[in-house]
Amino acid sequence: MAFNKLLLLRSAVLLLVAGLCGARSNAPDPAAVDHFERKVRPLLMGKCVECHGDETHESDLRLDTAEGLFRGGATGAAVVPGDLEKSRVIELVRGRGSLQMPPDDRLSPEEISALEEWVAAGAVWPGYDPASRMAQPSDDPLQTQFTPEQNSYWAFQPVRDPPLPEINARAWPSSPIDYFILARLEAAGTCSAPRADKRTLLRRVTYDLTGLPTTPDEMRDFLSDETPDALERVVDRLLASERYGEKWGQHWLDVARFGESAAHDGNNAYLHAWRYRDYVIDSFNADKPYNQFVIEQLAGDLLPKTGDCKADYDQVVATGFLQVGPKPVVMRDKRQMLLDIADEQLHTVGVAFLGLTLGCARCHDHKFDPIPTADYYSLAGIFTSTHVMADDLPDSKWVEFPIAGPAGEEVKVMAVRDLPHPKNLAIHRRGNYRALGPEAPRRFLQIVAGENHPPINTMGSGRLELARWIADPHNPLTARVMVNRIWQHHFGRGLVETAGNFGTLGSRPSHPDLLDWLATRFVESGWSVKTMHRMVVLSSTYQQAHLENSAAKSVDAENVLLWRMPRRRLTAEEIRDSILTVSGRLDLTKGGTLFSEGFTANDASRELFVVDISGKDRFPPFEHPRRSVYLPVIRNSRPESLKLFDAANELEPAPVRGETTVAPQALFMLNSPFAREQAAALAMQVLNNVAKSSAQNSTDEALTTLYFGVLGRNPTDEERIDAMRFLADYTSQFPEGTDRQDLFSRLQQEGVSDVKIETVASFFAWRALCQALFCTNEFLYLE
């Protein structure tokens, strides 16, 4: 009896479980399964999987699995169960658009009807649980809600004005900056390095502010000046020099990815891009407020006219910032070309002004930072509403037009204008303009400007509103990013080491309070870059020596806490300009263009010229002794003197340069025509001084002059002995029987014509010594 009751109970439970399972399984209609197996699956496998299967899945779409089909591809959902009009597969097989599938073996009306019946009935795929299908997004992609972690990220917090920290060694600071540095050093149980010697300090600050070496007279004057404000007066002199803007303009041109050709397949010349370069240099020399500098580059053409020819000219030329990047001008898909150019502009704006990688949100929400795809297309709509390209011919031309120049004369500029009918841009699913989502209103970054803030209220593109939002003192990124760049170029590393990425994949600030303190002072100073320079270089932190400290190194091997001044190699431009300077050949002419030859005309009437210098041993504009910042920047064809020593990548923003040490660098210094020619010019100066000297030991005097001119100091006794021996040994290779005429002819072939036949041997020796000095670490590095 008990056994029978147990059986009855077990049967009831099994029936109940079976009923529940049946209710949950929602088994498909047998007729729908039969239709799929007999008509739909064979159709997919026979006509579709060759291009959308396991081995090949064009447009990121697979039709050999249920997961692939219901997930969709690059153009969105392939099948929406029950909705024929939203199912991309049905649209393509019907052939109503420009794209038809399959492209060759078209489906018959009966096969199309079978697919339509299947989709309309719910798109049953046996064995695939409908509950696991990727649901279509129900949330509005234009409505954003950030997490508390995203909202609390340090870079998006308002800039604070922290108090100066408490320190023990109160005698050390000479600037408020030093309090922040010393507090960290004391907390780590270590101390700062002593002050650098005067020669080192003058050389350091002169290179940092002008990019050129000190002259012998400048060095002698500073070494003999014992007044307490000697360094301050030097700093003021350097900041007032026109050389300052050339040095710091180069840093900005790195960030602005400045170039004078389009790159890509059609490397067309930007004949008027040099005006933007000169604008940048002039802006730094004039200490133009940084917030104004930002606004002019993004929207100077939209600012009110001032009535001053030079100021109005600058405002328009400044928008060359948006034009001087690489452009795929020969791309066949011109709509895609414009989208790619807008993407390049947006990426540069993000890195340059905000320290964010905005371009990563083009195809999907940013994987690491709180930048949704909707924000990308809100901003991209601003740039696609800007007139950048003049036509859509096979070899497209960018916008150039005549305006009144600095003195009222007519000049042609490479700049931008607003399109006559600006409009919003729809979200492009997976970055594909053929798969459009909802329209993204033109507005700013929501993580900074606020979630779901109102669109820009404008009849124009929105560039001016964007520029003013970026330059607003309450924007937490703009001032931080710029003061970090200034710090980076003085210390070799920013307080945020990843100067172009303040996002979550970037570095955290090594001294967050100092970063905010500097950003606060920057805005208070009227966004004066020169004020920031003065504050930094007059600090005790900057004036430290580069000395070993084993105790400090054990605590902070990377010198993040700045217990000594970092050592850095000169930049590529500084190396080239320094060699020209000490040889006496540097041409300090300002501005203008050297871009006058090396072109092949594509369409002379439209001023379209391809820059092709491949296979040419020498390109005259590269050999001009002007400062390196004025040499033409031809994408993919940089001068060896710059490329070898890690000049910036001109194809994208370069907030931080690499630094390599490779054998070809030394070989360039010893064998290149450039190094030989400058060493020859310097050797000629030495020989002329020897010839004119009445000193008993004229060679020794010449060595003193040479070392002081190249290294800013007298040679040591050991260096004198070594140099004398070197000169004697080298000259002995040319005995009396040597054919001096042959040697002289060889020099003439190298372009050296001032040497007398009887001094050829001495000339070779002195030239070799000059080249050896160019290769020394003392010449190439700053401490």
Image (cartoon, rainbow, N blue to C red):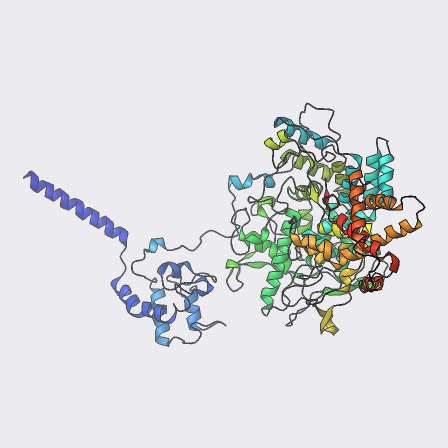
Please determine whether, in this image, residue 494 is positioned above or below residue 438. above
Q: Is residue 203 left or right of residue 268?
A: right
- Left or right: 246 as drawn, with respect to 665: right
Q: Position of residue 661 (x, y in %)?
A: 65, 49
Residue 547 is situated, as x and y percent measured from the top left of the image, at 69, 34
Looking at the rendering, in which quadrant would you find the N terminus?
top left
Q: Is residue 283 visible?
A: no
Whether residue 312 is situated above or below residue 503 in the rendered picture: below
The picture places residue 354, in percent across and down from the top left corner, at 64, 47
Q: Residue at x 92, y 44 (%)?
A: 695
Question: Quadrant of the image for the C terminus?
Answer: top right
**Closest to the observer, 221 or 764:** 764
Q: Residue furthest right?
A: 694
**Where is residue 406 drawn, in percent x and y?**
83, 58
Total count of labels: 0
Answer yes or no: is residue 324 visible: yes
**Residue farthest to the top?**
168
Q: Is residue 444 left or right of residue 210?
A: left
Name the foreground residue: 439 vs 567: 567
Residue furthest out toward the left: 1
Task: Report which quarter residue 759 is drawn in.
Answer: bottom right
Can you tell which quarter of the image residue 236 is in?
A: top right
The answer to which of 91 and 47 lies nearer the viewer is 47
In the figure, 413 relative to 713: above or below? below
Residue found at x 27% / y 53%: 25
- Looking at the image, residue 410 sits to the left or right of residue 514; the answer is right
